[in-house]
Image (cartoon, rainbow, N blue to C red):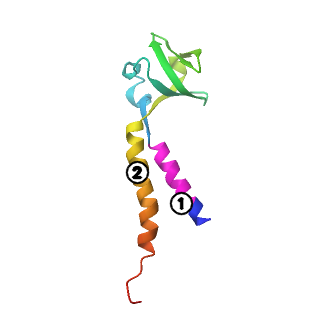
Amino acid sequence: MKNIIKPTILSLTILTSCVSTKVSSENNFDFSVLKPNSKYIIETKDGNKIRAFQLTKINENEIIGSQENKEIIIEKTNVNKVLKFSAGKTIPLVLVGIGVAIIAPAYAENKPVGQ
């Protein structure tokens, strides 16, 4: 059981750290940082998450984009957060995680020679 729990926790930690917040209350909902034709994760105030939202344009009151070839229009006032998946952070974290998962147990069980 221990062998399953540690990798699962490590995997979840790695995956959640690979997302960066682009728009939230911390930046006063500054939507100008978003780039058209980029994919985002939109968290709405009612708790929904719209994944793989490809931004088309932003106007005064709405952000417009698509998901699975369907146009989606979201009122800016209904947005809680806009997140972006960061693949550049993912690869190094996965490599470090794999290294730790393999090397740490081997090192921990290493015993001095002659005992």
Residue 20 position, x and y percent, is: 42, 35
Q: Quadrant of the N terminus?
A: bottom right
Q: Mark 2 or mark 1, which is nearer to you?
A: 2
| Residue 55 locus on image (x, y percent) | 47, 18
Q: How many residues crowd around disc 2 within 10 Å: few (fewer than 14), some, or many (20 or more)?
A: few
At x 57%, y 64%, the residue is 3
Q: Residue at x 58, y 59 (%)?
A: 5
Asked if residue 16 is among those painted magenta in the image, a careful observer would answer yes
Give how far across and how far down residue 14 sits, in percent. 46, 48
Secondary structure category for the residue under label 2: helix
Identified at 40% across, 51% down, the residue is 95
Q: The residue under label 2 is which amino acid type?
A: Leu
Find disc 2 in the rendering and name its residue: 95
Report how far apart the C-alphas of labels 2 and 1 lie in the structure.
Answer: 16 Å
Q: Is residue 85 left or right of residue 49?
A: left
Q: Residue at x 44, y 18 (%)?
A: 37
| Image: magenta residue range | 5-17
The one of 47 and 109 positioned closer to us in this rendering? 109
Secondary structure beneath dot 1 equals helix
**Is residue 44 part of the magenta span, yes or no?**
no
| Mark closer to the chain start, 2 or 1 | 1
- Classify 105 as above or below 85: below
The amino acid sitting under disc 1 is Lys
Q: Quadrant of the C terminus?
A: bottom left
x then y, percent, for residue 57: 45, 12
Q: Which residue is mark 1?
A: 6
Label 1 Cα neighbours within 10 Å, binned few <14 / some 14-19 / many ≥20: few
Q: Nearer the viewer, residue 28 or 101?
A: 101
